[in-house]
Amino acid sequence: MHAHLAHPQTCLALWAFGMNILNKCSRIFYPRCFKRCILTLLTGLASLYLCHYIYKPHVIIRRWLNVCTKPSNCKIEWDQNEIIPIYQVAFEPISVENHLEWHAIFHQESQQNLFLTRSQWTAFTGIILKQFNVTDHQLMQYISAPDILSTCVETVAENQRFPLPRKCSSLLEQLMNVGGMPPEIINSPNLMKAFDQNNPVDEYSKIYLDPISLQDTDNHSTMVNVTCDVVSRQRRPYLYRILQQWIRFADENRIMWWISSGTLLGAVRDGNMIPYDLDIDISVPAFEESKLRQLSTTRGRIKNGQFNLAVRPGPHCIESEGIRQNCYGQNVRSEIDCCAACEPFARAFYEVGWTYMDIYLFRLEMRFDSEQHPIEFTYFDESFNEFISGIYGLFPLKACKFLGLNVPCPRDPATILGPQYGKEFMKPRKLCNLTGRSWVKSS
């Protein structure tokens, strides 16, 4: 780790110190202590000033990688605070042996604006080698980042900065292969079956039972009929139909996707919905955004009984009101119907109501510090609203079961669910007490 990376920690300490003083000021603000309040207020503001201006050169700079659908659509973007060009990469589906694989294509104009030293490009390449699992390939396991650069970079001075030659980026494009959709998703016979055929028994894993109820069950069975109120019980056939149609829709339009959040958690636990969950969550890479906007159902043409795809009109919102439109295309300030959401990117549904599938965007990025040292590959999933380090647990996607259907899942779900739900993600937060037929909080 470079020495300068410790500065953000100092900045955070100053920030905490300043906020602590400001909190004290708010508690003592009355006439007798006016002077004391002003003094503490100035001290707090001084701490925040030091944090923002003295240590600003050491903040981590984010560079989005997949903000465009294809190279022709890429445009140079600039970080508003640091005035540094965003480094862009598009992922495009390529036919390989009768199936699609998504390969990276570097945006040449943005690439020419990123000047790094040879050691920095080596670090950049090394992170790609690690994160995209190419070192697992028999032909690549003995190739290092310096080996790759030596084939495409001429001799340069140690501290000389230069853009990555096209020959190098071509090699990296071949390495940055995230794979394709598992063929079992669209080829499964279960895709043609009705909900009752794929889900003949309404049972859940015993992990949803409290210890007392667990003692009274059959020790030879891993599944049990949960008699507590199951929120999703009435919704499941309708959600199943939405998911079933989405699988066909995504295949026809060559859209990469996978189940995420609570849906992934339910699939890992017992291949079912979490009993107290309300909807289905899936993620799509951000490079699919413009395609989904083109395929979406126009507001005002949304009808009950048809497959509708409503996308948000503005950016992702977390705490703010955001830009929202209802199903009739009217601007609204709150989520008055299933179309008026802005936290998920889109929603798929058959009826205008509260039974739907949430679709979240997933972004990849390479993170640099202010001295242009590549730090790590991270991703931001809107369903989680946080950055998570490493994508090695995501690609290539694999098939898993959910509601009797084959759906795409991350390669190693534990690396995705752990940061979201903690190490004990297999332990439900609510347990069913069979005697009282009620859900109790897990200890």
Image: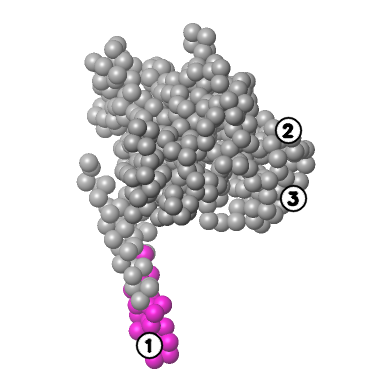
- For the point 52% across and 9% down, the residue is 98
Q: Residue 111 or 337: which is nearer the viewer?
A: 337
Q: Nearer the viewer, mark 3 or mark 1?
A: 3
In the picture, the disc for residue 330 is 3
Relative to 294, does residue 352 appear above or below in the rendering?
Answer: below
Who comes first in sequence, dot 3 or dot 2?
Answer: 2
Q: Which residues are magenta?
A: 25-48
Q: Secondary structure at mark 2?
A: loop
Relative to 419, does residue 70 appear above or below in the rendering?
Answer: above
**Are the two marked residues, 3 and 1, in contact with CB atoms closer than 8 angstroms?**
no
Where on the picture, by quarter, is residue 364? Answer: top left
Residue 46 part of the magenta-drawn span = yes
Question: Residue 233 at what x, y percent from top left?
Answer: 57, 42
Q: Amino acid at mark 1?
A: Cys
Q: Residue 305 or 156: which is nearer the viewer?
A: 305
Q: Secondary structure at mark 3?
A: loop
In the picture, the disc for residue 184 is none
- For the point 26% across and 30% down, the residue is 119
**Are the two marked residues, 3 and 2, in contact with CB atoms closer than 8 angstroms?**
no
Who comes first in sequence, dot 3 or dot 1?
Answer: 1
Q: Does any portion of residue 121 appear in the rendered image?
A: no
In the picture, the disc for residue 306 is 2
The C terminus appears in which quarter of the rendering? bottom left
